[in-house]
Every structure is written in structure tokens, then in C-alpha cells.
């Protein structure tokens, strides 16, 4: 290769080197490590083949964590999508109230993840939390499995709201007015106009928001770590939080490596399914 042909690749090096160092190398090492016993120092010991995966798939805690993750996905994704769509509809006008609403819906972006999780932990405290104080009811947010999962869902919606709102609001404001005005002339009502005309036109952005919500729900860990710590009785222990416990609490590095590879496979299946849906169901014209 001539020096002139190498020049573009030299410009890419500052971006490629951190990716190789902090993304691709750790991934390859983790994939290899999942087939070995790993010492407390992180060194590879005896080769186990698929033994780590066999012991993982017979671990009831793994399947319980996976079940909790899918329960969270089923609860979080529809609620998140509905809240974002409702926020866009509420603030899509041009008055002062709409401007105020837009500011409110963007505010969650100013809070960090850990700060928001701590705030929600105090808000949903059973004894002196502001939520129970407002409604004057001792709701078991931390001692009931369903309530604890709901509190995580509320936190997840709060964390994702600002970015998803900005994306969908931009798509809503840039809709082609031609089909909308034609439907209005044909006497289409507000509900029909939104669900039959506007939603299909916003489908690329909506599908991206749903995909990102699925990704966030599959990989949720820090909110669980801060807010519920997997309780009560492991009812909110997700698969990535189980990876955290295995790797950093129990020093079960071999199990953690196997868990991370199963999460990688699930994320890959999710991406392929999204790409197939996008190819068959979504048009950008």
C-alpha cells in the first residue's frame, strides 16, 4: 500500500485505538475466558469447554434473573412508549403552556443516573417517602415484588423520557403536511388523524425509541443496584445485575463471563430482529 493510500487510515487511528483497547480486546478476552476457570487474580486456569455454560444453565438463580429481566421488558417498553407519545401530544402546540411542558419533559436530562435512582429511592420509601405521604397510604414499594418492579419501571421511564421525547417531538414537527391536510379535508377525526396518519409517518422514530427501550431494559443494572439491590427476595434481580454480583461480589469470574456472553447473544438477536422489522415494515419515504 502506498503512503498516500495509508493516509486516511492514519486519521482513523485516534478513534480506532480506544475502540480496540476498551471494546474489542475486552470482548474477545471475555469470550475466551468463558471457556476457562479463572483465578482470583483474573488469570486463565483449566480449560472447561462448555462447562461454565452447562453449570450456568442449571443455575436456578440465572433463570430467575432472566425471568425478571423479561418481566421488566414487558412492563417498561409499552409504558415508556406511551408516556413519550403522550408527552409529545401534550406539548405539540404553540402556546406558553406547551413551552413550559417542553421544559418539564426535558428536565430529566439534567440529572445523572445514580442521582435519579437515589432520588427515586427516597421518594418511594415506605415509611417516610413523599409518594406515600402525598397519597396517605402505606404502599409496600420495597417489600412487594410487583411494587418494587413498578418503581423500577417508573425510574426507567424518567431516565429515558428526555431523549426519547426530543426524538419523537422532532419527528412530529417535521411530518409532511400533505397527507395530514388531505385527511383533515376528508373529515378524519383527531384520533384517526393521529393513529392512522401521523403514527405511521413517525414509525421510523417510534421503532428506534422502542428498540432503545428494549436495549435499556435488557441491560438494566445501575438502577437496580441503587434502588432495590435486587430485592425483595431477588424479585428485581435482572440478568446484568446478576452478572455484577457474580463478578464483583462473589468473584465468580467464569460464571460472570458466561453470563455476559449469553447477554451478548440476546442483544444480537434483538438487533437482528429490529433490522428485519425495519426492512419489512418501515418506510422512510
Image (spheres, grey):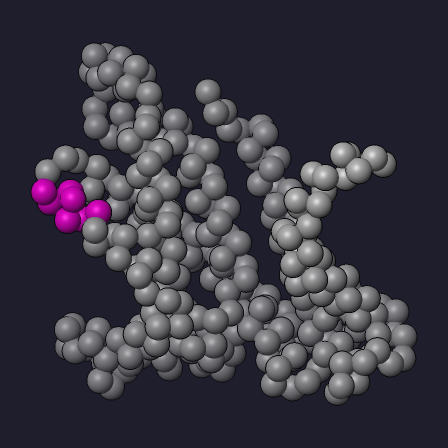
Locate residue 259, reporting x and y percent.
68, 68
| Front residue of this view, candidates 41 and 275 | 41
- Judged left or right of residue 207, residue 7 is right
Q: Residue 227 at x, y = what percent? A: 40, 76
Residue drawn at x 33%, y 44% is 166
Residue 128 in sight here: yes
Work out whether 141 lies above or below 4: below
Count of numbered labels shown in the rendering:
0
On screen, residue 259 versus residue 240, left or right, reads right
Q: Toward which corner of the image does residue 86 lie, by quadrant? A: top left
Q: Main secondary structure of the magenta part?
A: helix
**Residue 215 part of the magenta-drawn span:** no
Q: Is residue 172 above or below residue 220?
A: above
Residue 23 relative to residue 162: left or right: right
The answer to whether residue 82 is seen in the rendering is no
Foreground: 64 or 229?
229
**Left or right: 139, with 243 as reference point:** left
Q: Position of residue 126 (x, y in %)?
A: 28, 82
- The residue positioned 33% from the left and 58% from the top of the image is 109
Counting from the top left corner in percent of width and height, residue 256 is at 69, 74
Image quadrant holding the N terminus, namely top right
In the rendered image, the residue lying farthest to the left is 96
- Who's the residue at 69% across and 38% down the image? 8
Q: Which residues are magenta?
A: 96-102
Amino acid at each position: 500500500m502506498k503512503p498516500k493510500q495509508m493516509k486516511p487510515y492514519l486519521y482513523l487511528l485516534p478513534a480506532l485505538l480506544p475502540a480496540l483497547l476498551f471494546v474489542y480486546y475486552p470482548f474477545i478476552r471475555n469470550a475466551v475466558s468463558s471457556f476457562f476457570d479463572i483465578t482470583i487474580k483474573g488469570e486463565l486456569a483449566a480449560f472447561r469447554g462448555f462447562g461454565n455454560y452447562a453449570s450456568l444453565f442449571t443455575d436456578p438463580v440465572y433463570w430467575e434473573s432472566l425471568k425478571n429481566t423479561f418481566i421488566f421488558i414487558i412492563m417498561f417498553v409499552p409504558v415508556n412508549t406511551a408516556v413519550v407519545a403522550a408527552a409529545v401530544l401534550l406539548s405539540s402546540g404553540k402556546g406558553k403552556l406547551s413551552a413550559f411542558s417542553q421544559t418539564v419533559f426535558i428536565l430529566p436530562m439534567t440529572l445523572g443516573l445514580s442521582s435519579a435512582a437515589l432520588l427515586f429511592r427516597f421518594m418511594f420509601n415506605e415509611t417516610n417517602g413523599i409518594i406515600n405521604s402525598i397519597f396517605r397510604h402505606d404502599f409496600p414499594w420495597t417489600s412487594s415484588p410487583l411494587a418494587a418492579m413498578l418503581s423500577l419501571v417508573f425510574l426507567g421511564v424518567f431516565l429515558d423520557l428526555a431523549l426519547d421525547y426530543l426524538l419523537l417531538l422532532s419527528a412530529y414537527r417535521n411530518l409532511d403536511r400533505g397527507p395530514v391536510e388531505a385527511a383533515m379535508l376528508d373529515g378524519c377525526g383527531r384520533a384517526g388523524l393521529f393513529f392512522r396518519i401521523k403514527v405511521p409517518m413517525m414509525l421510523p422514530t417510534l421503532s428506534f425509541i422502542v428498540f432503545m427501550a428494549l436495549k435499556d431494559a435488557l441491560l438494566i443494572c445501575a438502577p437496580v443496584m441503587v434502588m432495590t439491590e435486587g430485592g425483595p427476595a431477588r424479585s428485581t434481580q435482572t440478568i446484568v445485575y446478576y452478572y455484577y454480583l457474580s463478578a464483583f461480589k462473589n468473584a465468580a469470574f467464569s460464571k460472570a463471563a458466561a453470563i455476559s456472553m449469553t447477554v451478548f447473544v440476546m442483544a444480537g438477536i434483538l438487533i437482528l430482529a429490529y433490522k428485519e422489522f425495519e426492512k419489512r415494515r418501515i418506510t422512510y419515504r
